[in-house]
Image (cartoon, rainbow, N blue to C red):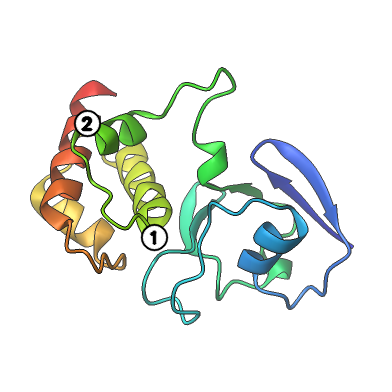
């Protein structure tokens, strides 16, 4: 039995501790906003926060998250349903095209702004370098992060 605090809720999972966190989140908890992309921690589609740090859930064993605070894309919106400043900026700048990478992109952007509230282009490039967008929306992503920083 693995114990997690996921999006502010306690969860007890009867899942093999070696199972990737991604599959526990999606299959056991039904939180399907976190996406499977490459399976080797290279694309960033599966990014979640563990104790506030962005991690690739496809390559993180469930056992590594035991006893931690895990936040998925579903946990970024507040209890009243208000979108996070990053999510609002994503809409304003019409960032998504296919949308597949967006939950991971947003999770990385949220983590960046929590540690660097007024990021430079270099800060954004560094923080987002592990997130691949096959549609090439990098300019819109950067603009949305800058907007979210101003409005947060």
Give the farthest residue toward the top.
80
x, y (%) of residue 33? 54, 51
Crowding near the residue tagged with mark 2, few <14, some 14–19, many ≥20 C-alpha atoms within 10 Å? some
Residue displayed at 23% across by 46% down: 95
Mark toward the start of the polypeptide (1 vs 2): 2
Q: Quadrant of the C terminus?
A: top left
- The residue lying toward the viewer, choosing from 52 and 12, is 12
The residue identified by callout 2 is: 92
Residue 15, image x, y percentages: 83, 69
Side of 57 where 90 appears, left or right: left
Q: Residue at x 50, y 31 (%)?
A: 77
- In the rendered structure, find residue 135 and report the number of the disc placed on it: none
- Residue at 47 percent across and 53 percent down: it is 53
Q: Quadrant of residue 3?
A: bottom right
Number of on-image labels: 2
Pick the residue in front: 112 or 72. 72
Q: Dot 1 corresponds to which residue?
A: 100
Viewed as shown, does residue 12 lie left or right of 124?
right
User: Which class describes the residues within 10 Å of circle 1: few (<14), some (14-19), or many (20+)?
Assistant: some
Examine the rendered structure and indicate whether residue 146 appears above or below residue 26: above
Q: Quadrant of residue 134?
A: bottom left
- Above or below, 6 against 128 in this view is above
Q: Residue furthest front?
A: 98
Q: Residue at x 38, y 46 (%)?
A: 111
- Mark 2: which secondary structure? helix
């Amino acid at each position: 039995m693995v114990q997690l605090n996921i999006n502010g809720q306690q969860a007890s999972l009867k899942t093999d501790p070696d199972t990737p966190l991604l599959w526990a989140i999606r299959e056991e908890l039904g939180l399907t906003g976190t996406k499977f992309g490459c399976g080797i921690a290279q694309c960033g589609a599966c990014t979640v926060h563990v104790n506030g740090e962005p991690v690739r859930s496809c390559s993180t064993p469930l056992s590594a998250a035991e006893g931690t605070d895990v936040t998925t894309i579903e946990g970024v919106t507040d209890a009243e349903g208000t979108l996070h400043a990053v999510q609002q900026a994503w809409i304003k700048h019409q960032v998504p095209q296919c949308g597949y990478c967006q939950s991971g992109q947003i999770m990385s952007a949220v983590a960046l702004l929590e540690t660097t509230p007024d990021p430079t282009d270099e800060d954004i490039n560094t923080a987002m370098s592990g997130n691949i967008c096959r549609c090439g929306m990098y300019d819109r992503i950067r603009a949305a992060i800058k907007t979210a920083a101003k409005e947060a």
